[in-house]
Amino acid sequence: MSHHKFLTSAAIILLPISPAFAQSGQPTETGDDFHNDDAIVVTAPYVDRIDILAGTSVLTGDQLTQDLRGQIGDSLTKLPGVSSTSFAPGSSRPVLRGFQGPRVRVLTDGIGTLDASNTSVDHAVTIDPLTAQSVEVLRGPAVLLFGGDAIGGAVNVIDKRIPRDVPDEAFHLDAVGGYGSAANDWSIGGSLDVPLTESLVFHVNGSYRDTDDVDISGFVLAPELRSEVLAAAAEETEEGNLDEAAELTETANQRGSIPNTASRTINAATGLAYITDGGNIGFSVSYYDTDYGVPSRPGTEHAHGDDDGGEEEEEEGPVTIGLEQIRADLRAGVNLGDGFFESLNLRTGYSDYEHTEFEGDEIGTVFEVEGIEARAELVQNDRNGWRGVIGTQFLARDFNAIGAEAFVPKNTIESLALFTVQEVDLGQFEVEAAARYDNTDISSNIVNFDRSFDSFSGALGFAYAPAEDGLKIGVNLSRSERAPSAEELLSNGPHIATQAFEIGNPNFTTEKSWGGELYARWNSEDIQLSATVFANLFDDYIFEADTGEEEDGLPVFQFFQEDATYYGFEASASFVVARAGGFEFVTDGVADYVRAKIKDGGGPVPRIPPLRLLGGIAAKSDAIDLRAELEWSDSQDRVAEFETPTDSFTMVNASVAWRPLGREGGVTLLAAANNIFDVNARRHASFTKDYVPLAGRDIRISAKFSF
């Protein structure tokens, strides 16, 4: 890969900047614990109460440990409004309010992952949840801090690669390990912080995970797809092709486990930070390595060129992906005193990423990504209830796909953004405003493509909070605009991992959205309630859909641009119903729903999650927590053309957490039984849901230590 672009950009690195989650030398609100139980969003002072953040969820503590999976998407699905792409156990991105792909930003400490995960659903996210301190899910206008393209929201993973404070003790050790029965899933991770001086702290962390093929209940193939494969087997039998018929019958009758879903992941990082009252500076270097299988879509043999320039159909081996990323990060902050600006925060990340898609033992396609992202923010001091932030953001990415099935040509993306968030506190009333401008240039010399896009986004919020009664109600209005991605513009070819022929459109314009949400929250000692209804009206909405055609023996998935509408709701509630015998008895629930359609008779938007309800009861004490929960997902019959419906399912889960040294003792032992009744379940948001169901009964045990 070429490095010239990033060497010449070195002067820019210290100008663009740090996220809202960096604090200038101050400890984070989650404290030192590896998985802290305080559900507090780690944000800078200017956004810790801002109502433009309506709809924020945080996963931390024992809940994060119990829900740990190999990919961040599968670790968040119990939060309101969150589903997952669930392409395979080794590759899964979050789905927020029905949005996925480039409309959901996945961040690590406020900076993008700088991988290829938003290029295609089969590409893994280079974040290991094992080493996460907390995970924040931001929905609504708040994401203007991180990108106008993130209309659905942002997922920000907070880790400790760059320390935020200096431990009081000689060292601080956090560790977590576990086992899951459904995939013979063994995992271990840990981090160590050592103060070298009163201001200098050294950090190291690492993790390892190894899984086998995933066990499931029932058949691998969904009923409709299984019927199609059996019909094809019968046709082959009639034509006398007995070997082909036997192979198809074997595929249709596969059950008990999903072939080619094993994975192995290694992650390691080291960091150093200098922290004083006047500011901080720190850096880290990390390495991420994963190998995982890609389940096969039945009936997708595609053509390869023969020696005479023609085409011949051949049977490929199982598709697997080997991925490596080397990453360097910098975070710095300077406290500016009592003037107009309180602090200047800087944040930069650089990544060298490569993954190879193998067909059996043969190399199919190699994807290379080299990128740098940087942010700078000037945080304003509070002036009689007025506070805010002004910032800029820079991104440069070189992307290259090498091989006969490189479905996207080599391309370069450069973007520069300016943004601000401002809040005025008027007592019981608050007003917030946000604005963002992005300039994005996408070029590809191979196909003589070079276009520049200007995008303008803004948001305005109003909130009312009667004094001291725990109620807050508000409304947020937003106008978001995003440039089309390189994949949406330039895709044109077979993609072996998704087993589809993907086609973009180089003439797409920017995608525009008018959004609104109404929310209400109630917080008291025993009751927490939150409800949000939202709607987005799109002009020139970009989506990928099955055309029903075939090319090179693969189904053709093409990107289209039409107007569209999204609307839905998400709600959560928690009630303390009783206290007795040192226990607090709690009941809680989550509900979410999205409906989306293409205007002018275009039908439903593909892969929209159905109505979901999740409820649980728990008994909590200092030493032990007991919980049982039920999750019901409705069937999804509102499907796009050539998209298959998905059956409803109900899963029952139970868990126990034991703290032998008490809640502050630093030791937690956990056990959980997921999908107790071993149901066959599929996520409608998944590209592969017809042949990659969710895991069957899964008994998980884990231990967490913090000293």
Image: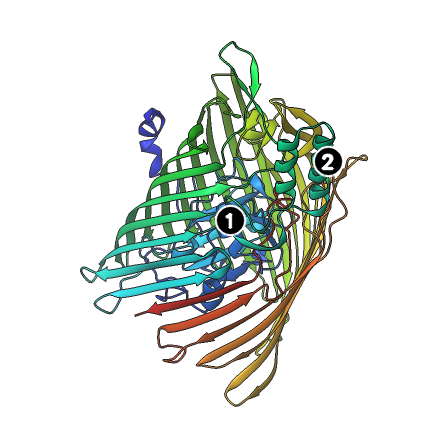
Residue beneath disc 2:
234
Nearer to us: label 2 or label 1 = 2
Per the rendering, the mark at residue 684 is none
Residue type marked 2: Ala
Q: Is residue 350 above or below residue 577?
A: above
On screen, residue 698 versus residue 286, left or right, reads right
Describe the element under mark 1 as helix, strand or loop.
loop
Residue type marked 1: Pro
Q: Could you say where residue 527 lies in the image, as x and y percent from the top left?
A: 61, 75
Residue beneath disc 1:
89
Report how far apart the C-alphas of labels 2 and 1 lie in the structure.
32 Å
In the picture as drawn, the residue positioned furthest to the right comes out as 601
Q: Is residue 244 above or below residue 651?
A: above
Answer with mark 2 or mark 1, whichever residue precedes in sequence: 1
Q: Residues within 10 Å of mark 1 (few under 14, many from 20)?
A: many
Q: Residues within 10 Å of mark 2 (few under 14, many from 20)?
A: some
In the picture as drawn, the residue positioned furthest to the bottom comes out as 581
Which residue sits at x=56%, y=58%?
56
On screen, residue 541 versus residue 354, left or right, reads right
Q: Could you say where residue 91 lies in the image, as x and y percent from the top left?
A: 50, 45
Describe the element under mark 2 as helix, strand or loop.
helix
Q: Report if residue 483 is visible in the image.
A: yes
In front of the other: 229 or 464: 229
